[in-house]
Amino acid sequence: MEPRSSGVAPGGVSVSAVLPAGGSGERLGGATPKQFCAVQGRPLVSYAVRAMERINWISDIIVVVSPENIETMKTIIEKYGHKRVTVVKGGITRHRSIFNGLKVFAEDEFSCHLLQKPEVVIIHDAVRPFVEEDIVSKVVMAAKEHGCTDYDLDYGTECLHLALKYCKTNAKLVEGTADLWKVTYKRDLYAAESIIKDNLSQQVCVITNVKETLAQVGFLLPESLKSQIKVEAISISLSKNDSHLQNIISGQCYNFVCVNDKRCAIQETQELVDMLEKSNIPLLYPVVLILVHLDSSENNSFSIGMEDLTTIKKFARETKKKNILVYGLLIQHKDPLLLQETVNSAAALIMALIKDRNPELIGQLLVA
Amino acid sequence: MEPRSSGVAPGGVSVSAVLPAGGSGERLGGATPKQFCAVQGRPLVSYAVRAMERINWISDIIVVVSPENIETMKTIIEKYGHKRVTVVKGGITRHRSIFNGLKVFAEDEFSCHLLQKPEVVIIHDAVRPFVEEDIVSKVVMAAKEHGCTDYDLDYGTECLHLALKYCKTNAKLVEGTADLWKVTYKRDLYAAESIIKDNLSQQVCVITNVKETLAQVGFLLPESLKSQIKVEAISISLSKNDSHLQNIISGQCYNFVCVNDKRCAIQETQELVDMLEKSNIPLLYPVVLILVHLDSSENNSFSIGMEDLTTIKKFARETKKKNILVYGLLIQHKDPLLLQETVNSAAALIMALIKDRNPELIGQLLVA
C-alpha cells in the first residue's frame, strides 16, 4: 500500500508539488466537492496529499483550495498528520489557482522567499488519489530534459493541450498508469473505494497464541488463507513485545487475525490495539482485526453467551474510534473430520470481512 | 431498477439492436474478456442485453461474439432467460463484427429474410451495462430525422468520428448520461458493481407477522429504516397468499425483512422464497432476505442455540442456489427503554446487509 520512497530526486533536482483542490464537484451530483468526499472515511484530497508526501524528495506540497474550504483543509492536514503542506487560497479558474500556488515560491521584493524555490514543480490534481513515485520521477525527468525555467506539467492530455496553447512551454506528455485517473463522477468515487479496499486486502497477519490446543487451527487457517492473500503467520503471546510482529505492523499490514481459546480474549487483543495505535498505521486506513475463538465445547449450545457478545461489541465500539474494526469469529471444533471444512469456511468469512471492511458489522460474532 | 418500457417506438419506426461483444479485455488486466466478467454474479454482457430487452419496442437484439465465445453466450442467454436475442459470429475488427451483426437483417437472394429488416439499428456496446429507454429513444429519433437508410449510431464521440470518416453517414452525436460509460478498466467493473448494488438498495419490504408481541417492532423498524431507504411495511401471515405482497414483488423489490417471534421461522420464510422464485425476480439480481427474530427472553443467554444456527445456515445455503441471500438478525427486547436504540442498530445492520449483498455472510446471525 505504501511503498517506501527511493529518497533521491531524479537528476538531483529540487522538487515541490502544487495540488489544485478548488473544484466544485458538480458532475459528481452531490453537495460536497469531490476532493472532500470521504473514501474509507478519509477525504479524497488527503489521499492525493499522502501520495505526494510519501515521496520524500518532494520538498513542499502546496494545496490550493477555495477560500471557504481553507479551514476544512487545515483540519484535514492536522487530523491525518500530513507534513510539508501549505494551504493557499485559490482563484476563480483552475489556472488562476495553480498560479496562486506557484506564487508561494516567488521572490517577494519586500520580504524573503516564502518557501524555497524548487527547480521543478509538479502539478497534481487533488482528485487523482493514486500516483506512484516512478511516474512522478518520470515527470520530473521530463521536466528537467525539456529545460524550462518554471515548469507546469500535468499528466492528462487535456492539460497538455492547454499548456501547449497558452503557456508556450515545451510540454511533454508523460505516460501514466491506468490508476492515475481522475475522480469526476460518483462512479469514480465507488471505484476509488474499491481500489483502496483491494490494496488494503493484500496481506493478513495471523497471530496464534502459543498453546497446544490451538496448534492445529494455527496451522490450518493460514494454509487455507494462503490461496487468497499473502499470509504472515506467527505464534506468540500477545502480551510479550515481539519484534517480528512490530516489523509486520510497521510494514503496513492492515489486517490481523488473532486465534485464541479464551472467550473473546479482550485483554490480549488490547495489547495489539495499543501497538497498532502507537504505530500510526490506523491513522490513514481502517485496520481489520478479527478475533477468532476456538470452540471445542462438547454440548450443543453456544460457548459464548450474551455477556461475551456485549463485551466484544463494547470493545469494538471503543477501538473503532481508533479506526480499528474488530469482528468476532467462532470456529467450532467438535468433529475432527469436519475441521478442515470449518477452517475453510472461516477463511472465507475472514476474506469477506477484510475485503468489505464494513464499519457497521463491527462487534458481531460470525460462526464458521 | 427496471422501469417499465413505454411500449411505443419513437416515431413509430421499427428498431433492432446490435451489441458488439467481441473485445478481448486486455486493458482490464484479467484473463476473462470484460463482457463476460461477473458483476453481482452475472456477466456484464447480460446487463447490456437486459438493458435493450426491457425496451419492448426493440424487435431483435443481435449479440456479436468471437467464435470461441458463441457457446458461452448461448448459455448466458438461456440461464438468464433473455428473449429476442440472436447470437452472431464476430469478425477480426469491431467494424467487421458490427457488419456481421447487420448482415442478419440483409436480404438474401436465395432465401428469405433472416430477421425482419428494421428501419433503425442501434449499435450498443456490450460493455456499457447501463442505458435507459429515453436515451435509446433519442438515438432513434436522431436516426429518423437525419434519414439514412441503414444507420449506425453510437453514443461515444470516438465512434462518431469513425462514422463520419468512413461511413459518410449523417452521424449525429446524441447526448448520453453519465451512467452510459463503458467498462474498460478493472476500476470500471468495481464502479459497475457499486452502481448496481446502489440501484438494488433503493427499496425494502418489511413483513411483520400478525402478532401483538411484534406490533411495536413492526412499527419502529420501518420508521427507523425510512430515513435511509424507501420502505413498504406490511403486516401479514406469510402462509397466506397476499396480493399486496405479490404486487411489491412484481414491482422489482430486491430486499425483504421478515419480522417473526418464532425461532428462525424457516417454514414461513419458505413461502416467501417460493413466491420470489416464481416471480423470476432473483433471476437477474441477488435478492436479500433478512430474518429478524425478536428475542424477549428474560435470561442472559442466547435464546437461539447452535441447532437453530445450523438450521439458518442450511436454509441460507439452499436459497443461495436460487440467488436469494438469507441473513439472520436478532433484536433483543428486554429493556423497553433501550428498544428504540436497539431497533436503530438493527436498521443500521439491515442497511449494511442490503448495501453489501455479500454472499459469504449468508446464514450468519447478527445481533442488534
Image (cartoon, coloured by chain):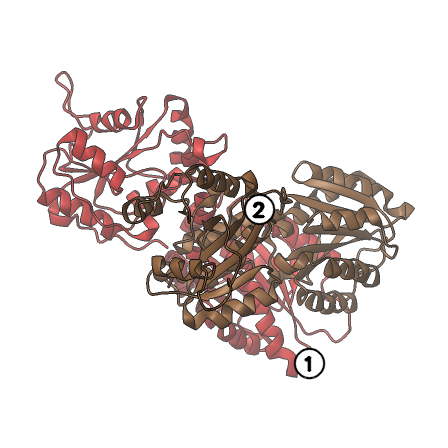
Chain colours: A brown, B red
Q: Nearer the viewer, mark 1 or mark 2?
A: 2
Q: Amino acid at mark 1?
A: Asp
Whether residue A214 sits left or right of residue B65 in the image: it is right
User: Which percent across, then down, holds residue B309?
Assistant: 69, 56
Q: Residue furthest front?
A: A109
Residue drawn at x 67%, y 65% is A320
Q: Quadrant of residue B34?
A: top left
Task: Estimate how packed mark 2 is, as few (under 14), some (14 to 19) or many (20 or more) residues with alpha carbons within 10 Å.
Answer: some
Q: Amino acid at mark 2?
A: Asp
Which residue in the structure is indicated by mark 1?
Answer: B335
Whether residue A211 sits left or right of residue A119 in the image: it is right
Which residue in the structure is indicated by mark 2?
Answer: A198
On the same chain: label 1 and label 2? no
Residue drawn at x 72%, y 38% is A224
Residue A192: assigned label: none
Q: Residue furthest right?
A: A212
User: Which percent across, then down, holds residue A199?
Assistant: 59, 46
Judged from the image, the secondary structure of the residue bearing numbered disc 1 is loop
Asked whether residue B197 appears in the rendered view, the answer is no
Q: Quadrant of residue A41?
A: bottom right
User: Which percent across, then down, holds residue B357?
Assistant: 53, 53
**Relative depth, front residue between A315 and B268:** A315
Whether residue A80 sits left or right of residue B94 in the image: it is right
Whether residue B84 sits left or right of residue B320 in the image: it is left
